Structures are given as C-alpha cells and as structure tokens.
C-alpha cells in the first residue's frame, strides 16, 4: 500500500502548518529572546509565507519532489540558523522518499531527514534543540509504521510532546542559547517549540484527512 | 636549520639591521610588503625587533606585525640559504626606501 | 591573483565595515566581498546572498569566508555546497573571530598567501 503526496495530504497539511507558523511568530520570537537572538519566529514566519507563495507549483508533484522544493525554499527564505536545519531535514527526507512510498518508507525518510538536520547542526539529542522533539517523533513513527496510519501519527505526535517536555529542564549547549548558560534551564528552546508546532499541525491535518 | 641555531648565530647565517622610518612603523602595509618580499627568496629569513626577545619568520605577516616595531626603531634580519645575501640586501633596501615601490615595478 | 575574502555577518553594517577595515589593512588589490542580513534585509543571514557573493568573487586561488555566529556559518556551508564540487574545494570557512580574522586574512592574502595560509592566518590571530 503506497501513500503518495495526495494520499498523505501534503499540500493541505502544509497550508495548516504555514498558517500556524505565521500566527506563532510573536510567541516564537519571545522564546528566542529569552535564550537566543529573538528572531526565530520571524524566520519561521518568513519561511511559511514563502511556502504559501509557492503552494500552486506543488500540486500534482510526487511527495519526494514536494519535500525537496519546500526544503530548498526554507533554506532560501528563513535567514537564520533554523533555515539550514529545517531545510536540510526536508531536503534529505525528500531525497530518501521513493516514488511510491509505503508508510515505512515515510518513516525511514523522516529518520533520514532528522539525521541530516543533526549533521547540519552538528548536534545530537539531549542538547536542548529541535532534535529533542524530532528524533523521538521519528522513532515513534518508525516503530508504528506497520500499524494503522492514524495510530502511528498519534504516536508520533505524542512522542513529540514528550520530547518537548523533556527539553525544558536541559541546559543549552548549542546555538545562541549556549551563551545564556544556566538561564536556559527551565526555558523552552524555540526550535523545539517550532518543531512541536509543526508535528502537531501535520498530525492534525493527516488525522482530519483520514476521517 | 632551526630558530635556535639562528639564535646561536650559527654558521650559514648572515645578519644585518636596518631602521624602520615610516610613520606607522612596521605595521600593516609595510609588514605586508616586507613579508611579501621575503617570500620571494628561497632563504630562510628571520627578523627580530632591536631589544626584542625572539626571532620570528619574516615571511609570516602575522608574526611581523606582532613585533610592533615603531618608527625610528631598528630591526635585525638573519638569513640562511642560497640567496641569503640577496635577501638581506633586498629587504634592507626595501625598509630603507620606506617601502616605496621600485620604479617601474 | 590572490585569495579572495568573503565577510558574512548577521549585520550588513558589520559586514561592510569589516570589509572596509580589511581593505584598509591590505590595500586595493585584494578582492573583499561582504554580505549580511536576512532575505528581508533584517539582521540575520541569507544563503542566497552568500551564494551570490561566492559566485561573484570566486577564483582558482580560492576564497576564505569569515563568519560571525551560527547561522552565518551554516548558511555559508550550504552556499558552498551549491557550488560545483571543483569550485567548492577552493572555498574555506575560517574558524576565526570575524573582524580580527578578516584583517589577518587580508594581510596574509596581500602577502601572497595560499588559501590554507590565509585561513590559518585568520585562525591563529590570537597566537601570533
């Protein structure tokens, strides 16, 4: 059973995600001011708007191509440290996805994307970054990819939430937040926040599509 | 040939000294010109500020700048190798004419 | 021809000013490019702008890239990856402070240094 771009409802999910990112600009900036340079929300909103602008060209394309184009657009538009990270995640994911992907292909592609983002940012889990949300989410999806789609997506979303809770007490050692030192403990990493927002939005869109 | 050999003034090294005249001393542009000229020679060339402690590689612009030689102070040059004499003559001449470009160069 | 220098800062003002300082050190013969700001002109970095500069100033002797924090380096890495592999080989990002590194890189490039020597000069600034 394959889950192509249309079945996955990629473009619809993208719409919801971009909407949420634009709305979250101020909140993400606020998180970033506490432990960074205050521009994460702006960067993500800018990326979201550029994705909204290119939406038309994505219809009918295979999933892998959609992901590659989105990844590239994010790199070109975001303008912060997160642009290359999210961009690389999606580019790697798009490159890994075969022409007629099965659910387990999707899970493997997500894992490849997360690994790519880790290499790009030279980070690993436990360093209070987006990886603390994305890595558990990818593992959960992979563990359940043989099961029903909705169950797998819910598991992914729940793992993302748990990962987000787990990063809060950590001390930042990467990125601008590392300069903040002890004060980062108890603060939420903005990249982790935007990752959670993305996973939740994508899960919601997929589950709505199912019903 | 190691720097310590040079310190000892061992055989094979020729030495001379020259006073730095330009208003900015051996900073920035003059340092660049000196190290650039030094690289044109195959000899190993060392430089020390008068009264300074250590000999450094004259072909390293960073090291020459770090000497912080002020105007009116002398630098000592040591060279060893096939074109050592020519190197010293060339570099002393360069400093003496305050790093002006040679005519037609 | 000498090694070219590209200055990448989150701030266009800092990038331009740093290029000015480097040029003052090393004279007019060097090629010193600069870029700063995100795609909308605010503080940040833009992969596209960095790539544009790399394309403009690349030469066989190579280009050293001086960066300030995080995003400047990652976006520069991504821009280098967009180049032809043969060209990408001749571009190095220096692990050096932006301003001091740029000045020393300029001095070394003006002295006729190779790509590796120029990068090392920037990186060894505090050890000179």
Image (cartoon, coloured by chain):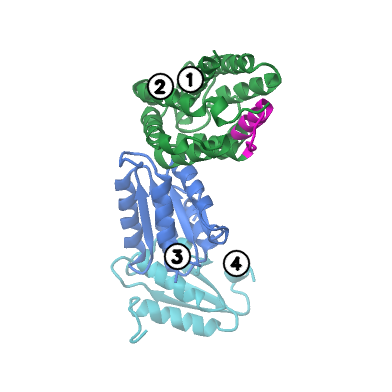
Read off the magenta span: A96-113
Labels 4, 1: front one: 1
Q: Colour of chain B?
A: cyan
List the residue tagged with mark 4: B3
What is the C-alpha distance between the residues marked 2 and 3? 48 Å
What is the C-alpha distance between the residues marked 4 and 2? 65 Å
Q: Chain of mark 2?
A: A
Q: Residue furthest bottom?
A: B104
Q: Position of residue C117 (x, y in %)?
A: 53, 62
Residue B37 versus residue A59 in the image, above or below: below
Q: Chain of mark 1?
A: A
Respond whether the residues carrying marks 4 and 3 are from the same subunit.
no
Quadrant for residue A62, please give it.
top right
Which class describes the residues within 10 Å of circle 2: few (<14), some (14-19), or many (20+)?
some
Which class describes the residues within 10 Å of circle 4: few (<14), some (14-19), or many (20+)?
some
The answer to whether the residue labelled 3 contacts the one labelled 1, judged by CB atoms less than 8 Å apart, is: no
In the image, the chain rendered in green is A
């Amino acid at each position: 059973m394959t889950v192509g771009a249309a079945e996955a409802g990629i473009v619809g999910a993208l719409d919801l995600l971009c909407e949420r990112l634009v709305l979250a600009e101020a909140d993400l900036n606020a998180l970033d001011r506490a432990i960074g340079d205050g521009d994460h929300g702006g960067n993500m909103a800018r990326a979201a708007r550029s994705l909204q602008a290119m939406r038309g060209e994505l219809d009918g394309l295979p999933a892998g191509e959609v992901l590659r184009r989105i990844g590239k657009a994010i790199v070109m538009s975001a303008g912060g440290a997160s642009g290359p990270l999210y961009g690389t995640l999606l580019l790697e994911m798009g490159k890994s996805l075969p022409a007629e992907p099965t659910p387990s292909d999707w899970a493997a592609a997500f894992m490849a994307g997360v690994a790519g983002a880790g290499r790009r940012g030279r980070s690993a889990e436990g360093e209070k970054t987006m990886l603390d949300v994305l890595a558990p989410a990818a593992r959960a999806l992979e563990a359940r990819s043989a099961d029903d789609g909705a169950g797998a997506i819910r598991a992914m979303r729940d793992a993302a939430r748990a990962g987000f809770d787990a990063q809060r007490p950590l001390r930042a050692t990467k990125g601008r937040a590392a300069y903040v030192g002890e004060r980062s403990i108890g603060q939420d990493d903005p990249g982790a926040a935007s990752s959670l927002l993305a996973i939740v939005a994508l899960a919601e869109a997929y589950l709505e599509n199912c019903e | 040939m190691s720097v310590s050999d040079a310190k000892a003034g061992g055989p094979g090294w020729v030495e001379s000294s020259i006073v730095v005249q330009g208003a900015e001393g051996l900073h920035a542009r003059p340092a660049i010109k000196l190290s650039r000229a030094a690289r044109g020679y195959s000899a190993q060339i060392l430089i020390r500020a008068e009264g300074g402690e250590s000999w450094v590689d004259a072909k390293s612009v960073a090291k020459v700048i770090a000497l912080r030689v002020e105007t009116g102070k002398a630098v000592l040059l040591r060279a060893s190798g096939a074109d050592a004499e020519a190197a010293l003559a060339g570099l002393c001449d360069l400093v003496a004419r305050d790093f002006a470009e040679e005519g037609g160069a | 021809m000498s090694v070219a220098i590209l200055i990448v800062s989150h701030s266009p003002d800092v990038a331009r000013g740093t290029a000015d300082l480097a040029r003052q050190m090393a004279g007019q013969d060097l090629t010193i490019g600069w870029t700063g700001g995100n795609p909308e002109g605010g503080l940040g970095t833009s992969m596209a702008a960095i790539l544009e500069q790399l394309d403009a100033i690349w030469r066989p002797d190579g280009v050293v890239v001086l960066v300030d924090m995080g995003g400047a380096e990652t976006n520069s890495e991504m821009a280098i990856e967009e180049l032809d592999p043969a060209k990408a080989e001749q571009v190095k990002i220096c692990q050096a402070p932006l301003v001091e590194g740029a000045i020393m890189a300029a001095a070394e490039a003006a002295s006729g240094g190779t790509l590796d020597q120029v990068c090392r000069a920037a990186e060894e600034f505090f050890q000179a």
